[in-house]
Amino acid sequence: MTRDVVIAGASFAGLAVARELPDRALLLDPVDVGEGQTSACGAPLGVLAALGALGSVQQVHEHLVIHTPDREVRWPVPEPFCTFEYRACCRAALAGSGAPVVRAAARGHRRTVALTSAGDVPARVLVDCTGWRAALAGGASEAPRPGSHPAPRGRPILYFGLEADVPAPFAPGLHFYFWPDVAPDGYAWAFPAGRTTRVGLLSYRARSRLGPALAAFLDRLGMPSGPLHGGFLRGGLHPPVVDGVFTVGDAAGQCLPLSGEGIRSAVLAGQVCGRLIGRALDGRLTLEDARARYSAFVRAQRRRYRVLRWATVAVLTLPARALGALAACVARPGVLRTFMSHYLGMFAPKPGWE
Ligand SMILES: Cc1cc2nc3c(=O)[nH]c(=O)nc-3n(C[C@H](O)[C@H](O)[C@H](O)COP(=O)(O)OP(=O)(O)OC[C@H]3O[C@@H](n4cnc5c(N)ncnc54)[C@H](O)[C@@H]3O)c2cc1C
C-alpha cells in the first residue's frame, strides 16, 4: 500500500499530521493504535477538540495545584485542561483522519522510501512521529543516559517518567509535587481522571529506576498502586527536518522543559506540518518551501523554550522554601497571566501564519 505521505508513529504527533492530509497519508506503527500508552494524558481541552477526540475526556480541570513541602498553591488556568483516555483519544483521532495503518516498525529511510519491518514503503513525503527514538529520520541514535540539566547546546534533553494508574479518585485539579525527598531531580504528580488517578514521578536527569520512589509517594498519598507505565520524554528542539524527513513531537525534541508536557506541542506542530505538506501536494508551495516554513515555525519557539529550560534549572537548584514562595508569587493574577500566556503561547501558530 502506498500514499503520498508516509507517517511513522500513530500517536499524538502522527495522528495530528494525518488528520490534515485526508486520503493522502498512510500511518506505520508496530503496535495497535491506542495501545502502548506512556503518558499521564493531561492536556488542554482544545487539544482534544483539535484531535476530534472530546469523547475521550475523563475529567476537566480548572486549576493546577502546586505542592511544595510547606505550601499548597492553586493556579487557575486560563483555558481548561483535561485528563483523557489514551486509547479512545487515538482511535477517535484515527477515525477522523481516514488514514490506513500498516502494522510495521520504521527502521530508517532511503531518500523518500521508508525502510520498515514489513518491507520498503515509497512515498513523496516522509514524516517521523516515532517518539523519542526518532526511528525513521535516525535523528536520535544516541542511547538514553542519565545526564545533567541543562544539556549542553545541541545535546538532547531527555527526561524519564514513570506512573501508576491508580483505581481511586483524587481531589480535583492537576497536582504537581515539588517534594525533594520524593523527587530530588524532578517532580511528582497526581492527575485525577474520573474514578482513577494517574500518579507519577519525573526525573529531569533521565533516571529510570523510579519504582521505589513512586511506591513511597503513593504510600504518602495514602493511595494503592496500579498498573505501571512510563518512558523517556525528548526535548531540546532538534532539527525539524532531517535529510528531507519532517520530524514532529518527541521525535523532534518538542516536549517542553519544566513541565514535560509534550502532547500539546506534538499536536500543534503536527497540524502545522500536515497543513504545509498538504499545500505542497496541492502545488500551492514547493516541498522545499514547506520544509523551510515548518523549520521557521519551530525556530520561532526557541526563545520561549529557553526560558522554560532555565526555569527547570531554578527548580533543580532553589531550596524548597524558596520554590514555594516563588509558586505563591506566580499565583498573583497579573504574574500568572503573563506566565500562562508565555507558556501556552508555545507552539500556538500566530494568526495568519499560513
Ligand atoms: C510517564 C509520562 C507521563 C506523561 N504525561 C504527560 C501529560 O500528562 N501531558 C503531556 O502533555 N505530556 C505528557 N508526557 C509526554 C508525552 O507523553 C509525550 O511528549 C508525547 O506522547 C509525544 O507524542 P508523540 O506522538 O511525539 O510520541 P509518542 O506518544 O511517544 O508516540 C510514538 C508513536 O510511535 C510509535 N513507534 C515507535 N517506534 C516506532 C517505529 N520504529 N516505527 C513506527 N512507529 C513507531 C509508537 O508505537 C507510538 O505510537 C508524559 C510522558 C511520560 C513518559
Image (cartoon, helix red, strand yellow):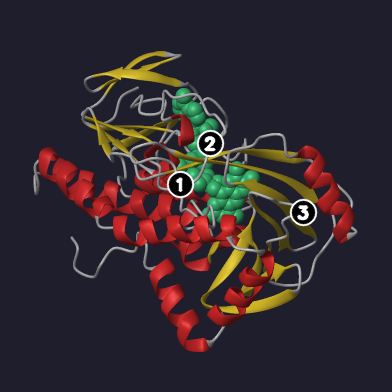
- Specify the label residue 262 is tagged with: none
Q: Nearer the viewer, residue 181 or 354?
A: 181
Give percent across and percent down for residue 73. Answer: 67, 77
- What residue does disc 2 label? 147
What element does badge 1 sit on?
Answer: loop
Looking at the figure, which quarter contains the N terminus?
top left
* Lateral position of residue 207 relative to residue 124, left or right: right
Q: Amino acid at mark 3?
A: Asp
Identify whether 87 is placed above or below 301: above
Q: Amino acid at mark 1?
A: Pro
Q: Amino acid at mark 2?
A: Gly
Instruction: Residue at 35%, 62% (x, y): give it.
Output: 304
- Bin the neighbour count of mark 3 within 10 Å (Cα to Cα): few under 14, some 14-19, many 20 and up: few
Alpha-carbon span between mark 1 and mark 2: 9 Å
- What residue does disc 3 label? 181
- Specify the label residue 150 is tagged with: 1
What element does badge 2 sit on?
Answer: loop
Instruction: Residue at 60%, 65% (x, y): give it.
Output: 82
Q: Nearer the viewer, residue 262 or 328?
A: 328
Identify whether 332 is placed above or below 351: below
Identify whether 25 is placed above or below 285: above
Alpha-carbon span between mark 3 and mark 2: 20 Å
Instruction: Residue at 44%, 24% (x, y): give it.
Output: 142
Quarter of image, res 329: bottom right
